[in-house]
Amino acid sequence: VGPEYVRAIAPYQAGKPIEELAREFKLDPATIIKLASNENPLGVPASARRAMETVITGLGRYPDPNGFELKAALAKHYRVPADWITLGNGSNDLLELASLALLSPGLSCVYAQHAFVVYRLATQARGARHIMVPARDYGHDLNAMFDAIDQDTSVVFIANPNNPTGTFLPAEEVAAFLARVHEHHGDSVTVMLDEAYNEYLDASLRVDSARWVEQYSNLIVSRTFSKAYGLAGLRVGFAIAQPRLTDLLNRVRQPFNVNSLAQAAAIAALNDAAFLEQSYEVNRLGKQALTEGFARLGLEFVPSYGNFVLLRVGDAARVNLELLKRGVIVRPVAGDGLPEWLRISIGLPEENARFLQALADILGAP
Ligand code: PMP
């Protein structure tokens, strides 16, 4: 029953919960480390915890359907009008809203090979045709993506940095692509620029992409509170776009898609510059420790701009199983067309060290 294009969707492969793995591998759940979902190893910022406490008594009521205060805080932070912002239940929700608003059977979307898996899931659910453009050095090939746009294309997805590969497109390349798409296709092709990992970039690489939104009426930029802001479990993300696109996204948005705890916590996290800085620094040092460890083991990895690293281990299924036996959860990415690789989220120093030790054990290195 239902449309054939829904039955054709290859489901998202979710990891097992820690308790289940503990039972399966006879481990103490407290000793298991999870480096699998690109979460913030520092956990929830204390400022967000305090903010959530203040809204608990109000949880008998629905959340603010328009997220007035959070949008006001974001508008100030990104220097855009509040009505250019759409809130989402995680930024996945924004990807889905864009797919709902912009795609249907008969239309097509463009994204890169090895790009974030939700582009495929959200757009297949709309019955849209897929144009998957081969990766270049594990990242997006923007020239090829431009050439791939056809007469049916209504949306192009770009992840910068990309997950699971960790690759990054410099600002000049993205700017040139945006200019070219807008010049040739105007508003008929929307570019969805997914910047979930933006806060992990070195300051010299970060761009104020809200300024691109001012320039291009066909651009949606999405960001999230799940990564550097430490709020993955609350599910809150947002998009910035000019009113024409923001209005479309809001037409297909559920009124109460972001809950009250998430709205309050996100405002606190947005204003917690110290936590953000600490998250960046823990990630920077962890990435250094991991990649130095990989080099010592003679393993190939893709230089990462996110809070994770893609590592070539050869027989990834075997290495993954051996890691699980040692209580270390990472992410196999065979489903992303990378059967020899594992994606390792960057953890706390002791977690990174334990992962490296387990890996050395398994690969029989000194
Ligand atoms: N975009 C990219 C590239 C991601 O890796 C992720 C999280 N895995 C998301 C978007 C969605 O994150 P969330 O829904 O938690 O905001």
Image (spheres, helix red, strand yellow):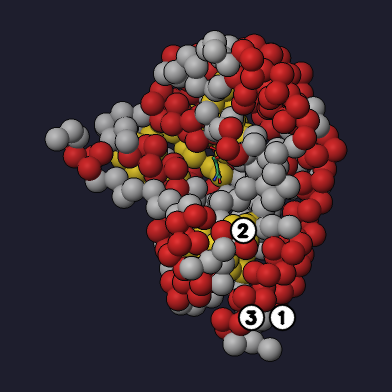
Q: Quadrant of ligand 1?
A: top right
Quarter of the image with the N terminus in it: top left
Q: Which residue is mark 3?
A: 360
Viewer-proximal residue among 181 and 339: 339
Question: Mark 2 packing: few (<14 Cα in 10 Å), some, or many (20+)?
Answer: few
3D distance between C-alphas at marks 3 and 1: 10 Å
**Residue 255 placement, left or right of 29:** left
Residue 151 x, y percent position in the rendering: 35, 34
Tell me the kind of residue under disc 2. Answer: Ala
Residue 92, visible in the rendered structure: yes
Label 3 C-beta lies within 8 Å of the nearest ligand 1 atom:
no
Query: Is 257 rendered above or below residue 9?
Result: above
Can the viewer see residue 343 in this picture?
A: no
In the displayed structure, would residue 100 be above or below residue 339? above
User: Measured from the top left, where is residue 68 in percent x and y?
Assistant: 64, 11
Q: Residues within 10 Å of mark 1 (few under 14, many from 20)?
A: few
| 2 vs 1, front mark | 2
Nearer mark to the viewer, of 2 and 3: 2
Q: Earlier in the sequence, mark 2 or mark 1?
A: 2
Amino acid type at image mark 1: Arg
Whether residues under marks 2 and 3 lie with C-beta atoms below 8 angstroms apart, the answer is no
The answer to which of marks 2 and 3 sits earlier in the sequence is 2
Residue 172 drawn above or below residue 354 = above
* Picture disc at residue 296: 1
Q: Residue furthest right?
A: 274
Give the secondary structure at mark 2: helix
Circle 2 is placed at which residue position?
A: 30
Q: Nearer the viewer, residue 223 or 359?
A: 359
Q: Where residue 300 sits in the image (x, y, percent)?
A: 61, 74
Query: What secondary structure is found at the residue carrying circle 1?
Result: helix
Asked whether, in this view, residue 174 is left or right of residue 331, the answer is right
